[in-house]
Image (tube, rainbow, N blue to C red):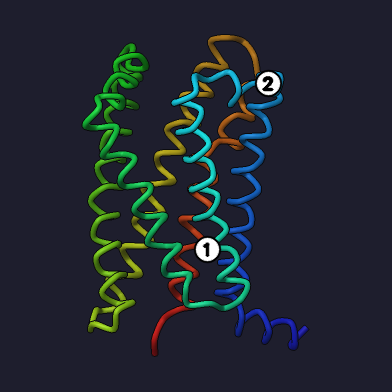
């Protein structure tokens, strides 16, 4: 028991980083497997060619980012920094893109019905803004730290935790909406959707990043 406790204490950052990254990859692949099954294996093939190319590229790029974080943690490779930066950029850019295209506001207008819907929608909007602000700061400070500049480690740790919190709150919003929709429809079959969503896989990767940065910390 003492040997196990000693091993866990010495390698806990790698264990948690690898464990959460593995969950992120599995959930991400499970999501696409489920949508393919539900569409009778016609999810990608049913799109117009330009949309299909973009969707396949997005799938492959995100999977590459996830796998970079996972494999680099398994190998104790400092290249995990690149995976972290790509993930933070991917999440942040996606939200900013939705802001500029108006897609994010269109979603809120559809969902925001009644006082509860408005509260949930505007809360989610704040979570998205938080992800963008914290994501940009985390990207800048992590880049400078990786390049050898003097950056206070506590600041990077705090930003990584805040980033994962905002990603997690975004998923909780999706969970709350799904529960509400399931209650209105009188069906519990929808409740598994949040747990096989891309957002949930992002939560796992965001948590993995916290422990990955701890593993890569310079003493």
Q: With respect to residue 203, does 16 lie above or below?
A: below
Q: Residues within 10 Å of mark 1 (few under 14, many from 20)?
A: many
**Residue position for label 1:** 69
**Quadrant in which residue 169 is drawn:** top left
Residue at point 24%, 42% (across, down): 129
Q: Position of residue 144 (x, y in %)?
A: 25, 74
Furthest residue toward front? 49
Q: Position of residue 159 (x, y in %)?
A: 31, 62
Quadrant location of the N terminus in the rendered image: bottom right
Instruction: Measure how far apart labels 1 and 2 are at the Cα level.
Output: 29 Å
Q: Position of residue 109 (x, y in %)?
A: 29, 16
**Residue position for label 2:** 38
Mark 1 / mark 2, whichever is N-terminal = 2
Q: With respect to residue 104, does 154 lie above or below?
A: below
Residue at point 68%, 34% (across, down): 33
Residue at point 61%, 51% (across, down): 25
Quadrant location of the C terminus in the rendered image: bottom left
């Amino acid at each position: 028991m003492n040997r196990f406790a000693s091993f866990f204490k010495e390698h806990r950052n790698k264990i948690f980083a690898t464990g959460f990254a593995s969950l992120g990859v599995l959930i991400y692949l499970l999501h696409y497997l489920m949508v393919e099954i539900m569409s009778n294996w016609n999810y990608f093939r049913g799109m117009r060619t330009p949309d299909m190319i973009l969707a396949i590229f997005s799938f492959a790029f995100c999977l590459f980012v996830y796998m970079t974080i996972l494999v680099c943690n398994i190998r104790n490779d400092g290249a995990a920094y690149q995976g972290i930066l790509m993930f933070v950029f991917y999440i942040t850019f996606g939200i900013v893109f939705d802001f500029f295209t108006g897609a994010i506001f269109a979603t809120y207008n559809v969902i925001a019905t009644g006082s509860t819907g408005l509260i949930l929608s505007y809360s989610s909007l704040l979570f998205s803004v938080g992800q963008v602000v914290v994501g940009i700061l985390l990207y800048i400070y992590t880049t400078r730290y990786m390049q050898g500049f003097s950056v206070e480690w506590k600041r990077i740790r705090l930003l990584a935790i805040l980033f994962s919190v905002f990603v997690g709150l975004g998923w909780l919003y999706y969970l709350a909406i799904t529960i509400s929709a399931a209650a209105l429809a009188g069906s519990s079959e929808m409740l598994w959707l949040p747990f096989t969503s891309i957002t949930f896989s992002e939560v796992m990767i965001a948590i993995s990043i916290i422990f990955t940065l701890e593993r890569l910390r310079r003493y």
